[in-house]
Amino acid sequence: MMGADLLFAGKPLFGTLIALLHNGKPVMGIIDQPILRERWVGVDGKKTTLNGQEISVRPCNVLEQAYLYTTSPHLFEGDAEDAFIRVRDKVKVPLYGCDCYAYALLASGFVDLVVESGLKPYDFLSLVPVIEGAGGSITDWEGNKLHWPVSSESRPTSFNVVAAGDSHVHGQALAALRWR
């Protein structure tokens, strides 16, 4: 469950995340928000659905017009914090909170960008088919596709993740995040 802290603080925007991987690539993802009775399902090669209805991201091709979500600005440290500030200072509206629900809002066309730092594979793998099936992009901060090659030696490492509804905003966010 992602967002348990929100639930304990009285904010019902947590979610259950489920991912199906094939050779380390997420091919199916579910974001389930039981209190609001909302379920997003993304399957590789198909349109994302919300409660059975197809959804899509909204157009926004300029970073300066984007609505940005992140769980908390306090989760960024060092160079990652500086990179996040560069993006935050360019967007129209920075918003905080929501955890996985922010990605659901992006897939549904309510926000344009989500930037996070320090996520584990179980935090983001289910989000990939949901975002991509809605027409968006989700990568690490260097623009690499997100996957997790599972083996007996695999250990959950931290990833920096950026998701956008529009490929132009995704590219502009990646350019602003360049921190190495």
Image: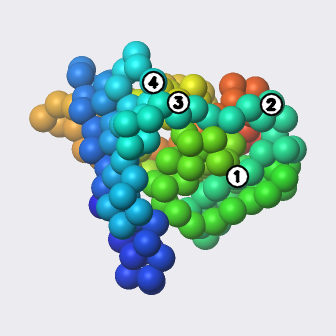
Q: Which mark is residue 19?
A: none
**SS at mark 3 in the image:** loop
Farthest residue in the left direction?
A: 152
Tell me, yes or no, whether the two marked residues, 4 and 3, touch with CB atoms within 8 Å: yes
Q: Nearer the viewer, mark 2 or mark 4?
A: 4
Q: Give the alpha-carbon distance from disc 4 to disc 3, as whole Å.
A: 6 Å
Q: Give the alpha-carbon distance from disc 4 to disc 1, as whole Å.
A: 23 Å
> In the rendered structure, which disc, 4 or 3, sits on the residue that comes first in sequence?
4
Badge 4 density bin: few <14, some 14–19, many ≥20, Cα 10 Å? some
**SS at mark 1 in the image:** strand
Farthest residue in the bottom direction?
A: 9
Q: Is residue 166 left or right of residue 141?
A: right
Mark 4 residue type: Lys
> In the rendered structure, which disc, 4 or 1, sits on the residue that comes first in sequence?
4
Q: Give the alpha-carbon distance from disc 2 to disc 1, as whole Å.
A: 13 Å
Tell me, yes or no, whether the two marked residues, 3 and 2, touch with CB atoms within 8 Å: no
**Percent from the top left, x then y, of residue 139?**
54, 32
**Percent from the top left, x then y, of residue 72?**
59, 67
Residue at 80 percent of width and 30 percent of height? 61
| Figure quadrant of residue 81 | bottom right
**SS at mark 2 in the image:** loop
**How many labels sit on residues?**
4
Q: Is residue 153 left or right of residue 39?
A: left
**SS at mark 4 in the image:** loop
Q: Which residue is mark 2?
A: 61
Q: Which mark is residue 134?
A: 3
Badge 3 density bin: few <14, some 14–19, many ≥20, Cα 10 Å? many
Q: Is residue 158 left or right of residue 62?
A: left
> In the rendered structure, which disc, 3 or 2, sits on the residue that comes first in sequence?
2
Q: Which mark is residue 47?
A: 4
> In the rendered structure, which disc, 2 or 1, sits on the residue that comes first in sequence?
2
Q: Is residue 155 left or right of residue 124?
A: left
